Image (cartoon, rainbow, N blue to C red):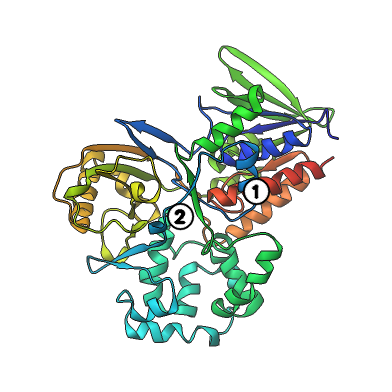
C-alpha cells in the first residue's frame, strides 16, 4: 500500500492520464494539473454540423493489452470500435496515380508501385551487412542501405510523413524506429528479424504495429481521456497554470499553480511531467542548465489539419481504404489524406464522405509563412483532382498545431540518455510524454505503464 505518497502529474494528455489512473489504482494520492479547460492533450474530437472528426490522433493501434484493460475498467465496450476492414488498404500516390501499398509477397510482386529493379533489390536485403554506425544513422540511410533508394522514396518517405510529419533524412532509426533498428542489431536483417521476433512479442503480450488492430471510439478518440478523467474525478484540475516546481528543504517538491486569481502550492513526493519538451523546459530548466539544452533541441514542426466533407456521389475514386500518403518526390502541397468516414462509423451519414488532410510538417514547415486560406485552397484542389471529386466541399474545418509532433532526429539518443541521467540526479522528478518512448497513442499508453512503475520504484 502506498497511501500518503503524493504524486503530482503535470499534463492531462493520454500519457499523463493513463499514468495517473494506474498510480491511483495503487493507492497513491494523485493530482493531475492541466492548463487547458479540457483533458486529452493533442487528442481533440469536435462535432460541427453533425460531422464528427478528430483534430489530433484519429485512431490508435492495439499494441498492448493495457488498452483493453482500460476499455474494460472504464466500461467503454459499447464505445470501442475497430477500424473497418477497408482501413487495411493503404494507398501511395505515384505519378499522380493512387497505388495500393502491397501487404503480401504476391501483392508486392504484382504491384505497379515499385519497379522490377526495386523488387529485385529488396530480395538482397537478407544478405546486407550490419551498419557500423547505427546509433547516428538516419532512417533514410538505413533503408537505402538495406532496401534500396526506390523503397525509401515510395514507401518509407511517405510513411514517415504520415506518422511523424517528418523527413527520413533527419529522423534517427534507433530512436524513431527502435524495433526496426533492433531487427538488424539482434538478427542481422529486417526480413529474417521480423520472422524470428514474433515469438518474443507473444511472450511480452505485444503486437507489432504492422499486425495490430486499429481502434477508435464511436464518439471519437476524446472518449478515452474523458473517461479516465471522469474516473479520477476531483483529482483532475483543468484550467490551471503550473508556475513552478521547486525542491523543498525536506527533499520533496512544491508545485505552485495558478487557479483563477489564486496561487496554490501542492507538496509532492514525486512530480511526473507529461507536457511537451518546450513547456517542460520552463518548469524544470532551473534544476540543470544541460537539461535546458536537451529539451530545447527537440524540434516540433507545425502541422495544419484540414477536415473536408463531400457528397459521396461526387467522388469517382473508390472509397475502399484508409487513405493515401504522398512521397516527397510527387511535390504536392499536403502530406496525405485519411478517409475518415470509411474507417470508423458515426463520422457522417451514408450519403457523405469525410476526409482529413495534413499539411506542413518537417517537409514543408514554411507553409505557416503563407496565407492560410491559400494553403488550404491549394491542398484542397490537389486532393479533389487525385480523388476525382466534381463537387464542392459541404463543410471545411481546420486546426493548426504550431508545434505538432516531436521529431526523434539523428542524435536523439543523446537526449534520451540525458533525461535518464537527470532523473537519477533529481529523484522524484520524472519526464514523460510523447517525446520519450514513442509518439503514437499506443506508445503513450504503454509508456505510461512504464512511467507508473518508475514512480512506484521510488518508494
* Residue 122 badge: none
Q: Which residue is drawn at 52% across and 56% down?
A: 213
Compared across the picture, whether 325 is left or right of 143 comes to left
User: From this viewpoint, is residue 33 visible?
Assistant: no
Q: Name the residue under label 1.
A: 66
User: Compared with residue 125, is residue 326 higher up or lower down, i.e. above or below?
Assistant: above
Tell which circle, 1 or 2, labels the residue nearer the N-terminal end.
1
User: Compared with residue 350, is residue 112 higher up or lower down, i.e. above or below?
Assistant: below
Compared across the picture, whether 365 is left or right of 232 comes to left
Q: Residue at x 25, y 43 (%)?
A: 352
The kind of secondary structure element at disc 2 is: helix
- CB atoms at circles 1 and 2 under 8 Å apart? no
Q: Name the residue under label 2.
A: 164
Task: From the top left corner, tell me how far across and down residue 311 is, in percent.
Answer: 20, 44
User: Compared with residue 239, is residue 299 higher up or lower down, i.e. above or below?
Assistant: below
10 Å neighbourhood of mark 1: few (<14), some, or many (≥20)?
A: some
Amino acid at each position: 500500500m502506498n497511501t500518503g505518497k503524493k504524486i503530482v502529474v503535470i499534463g492531462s494528455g493520454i500519457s499523463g492520464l493513463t499514468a495517473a489512473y494506474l498510480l491511483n489504482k495503487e493507492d497513491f494520492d494523485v493530482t493531475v494539473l492541466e492548463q487547458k479547460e479540457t483533458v486529452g492533450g493533442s487528442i481533440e474530437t469536435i462535432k460541427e454540423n453533425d460531422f464528427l472528426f478528430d483534430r489530433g490522433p484519429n485512431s490508435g493501434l492495439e499494441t498492448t493489452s493495457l488498452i483493453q484493460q482500460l476499455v474494460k475498467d472504464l466500461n467503454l465496450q459499447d464505445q470501442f470500435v475497430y477500424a473497418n476492414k477497408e482501413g487495411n488498404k493503404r494507398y501511395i500516390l505515384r505519378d499522380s496515380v493512387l497505388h495500393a501499398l502491397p501487404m503480401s509477397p504476391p501483392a508486392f510482386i504484382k504491384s505497379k508501385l515499385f519497379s522490377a529493379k526495386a523488387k529485385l533489390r529488396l530480395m538482397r536485403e537478407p544478405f546486407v551487412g550490419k551498419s557500423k554506425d547505427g546509433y547516428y544513422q538516419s532512417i533514410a540511410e538505413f533503408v537505402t542501405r538495406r532496401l534500396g533508394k526506390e523503397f525509401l522514396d515510395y514507401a518509407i518517405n511517405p510513411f514517415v510523413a504520415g506518422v511523424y510529419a517528418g523527413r527520413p533524412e533527419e529522423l534517427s532509426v534507433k530512436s524513431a524506429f527502435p524495433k526496426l533498428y533492433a531487427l538488424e542489431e539482434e538478427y542481422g536483417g529486417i526480413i529474417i528479424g521480423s520472422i524470428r521476433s514474433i515469438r518474443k512479442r507473444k511472450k511480452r503480450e505485444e503486437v507489432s504495429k504492422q499486425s495490430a488492430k486499429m481502434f477508435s471510439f464511436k464518439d471519437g478518440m476524446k472518449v478515452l481521456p474523458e473517461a479516465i478523467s471522469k474516473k479520477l474525478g476531483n483529482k483532475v484540475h483543468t484550467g490551471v497554470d503550473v508556475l513552478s516546481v521547486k525542491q523543498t528543504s525536506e527533499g520533496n517538491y512544491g508545485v505552485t499553480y495558478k487557479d483563477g486569481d489564486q496561487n496554490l502550492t501542492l507538496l509532492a513526493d514525486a512530480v511526473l511531467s507529461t507536457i511537451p519538451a518546450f513547456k517542460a523546459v520552463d518548469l524544470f530548466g532551473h534544476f540543470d542548465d544541460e537539461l535546458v539544452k536537451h529539451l530545447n533541441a527537440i524540434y516540433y514542426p507545425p502541422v495544419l489539419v484540414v477536415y473536408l466533407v463531400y457528397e459521396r456521389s461526387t467522388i469517382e475514386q473508390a472509397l475502399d481504404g484508409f487513405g493515401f500518403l504522398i512521397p516527397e518526390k510527387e511535390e504536392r502541397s499536403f502530406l496525405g489524406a485519411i478517409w475518415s468516414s470509411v474507417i470508423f462509423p458515426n463520422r457522417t451519414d451514408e450519403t457523405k464522405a469525410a476526409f482529413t488532410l495534413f499539411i506542413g510538417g518537417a517537409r514543408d514547415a514554411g507553409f505557416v509563412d503563407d496565407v492560410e486560406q491559400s494553403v488550404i485552397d491549394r491542398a484542397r484542389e490537389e486532393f479533389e483532382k487525385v480523388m476525382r471529386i466534381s463537387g464542392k466541399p459541404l463543410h471545411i474545418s481546420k486546426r493548426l498545431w504550431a508545434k505538432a509532433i516531436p521529431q526523434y532526429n539523428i542524435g536523439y539518443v543523446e537526449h534520451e540518455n540525458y533525461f535518464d541521467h537527470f532523473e537519477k540526479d533529481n529523484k522524484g522528478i520524472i519526464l514523460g510524454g510523447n517525446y520519450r518512448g514513442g509518439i503514437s497513442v499506443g506508445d503513450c499508453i504503454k509508456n505510461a505503464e512504464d512511467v507508473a512503475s518508475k514512480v512506484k520504484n521510488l518508494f
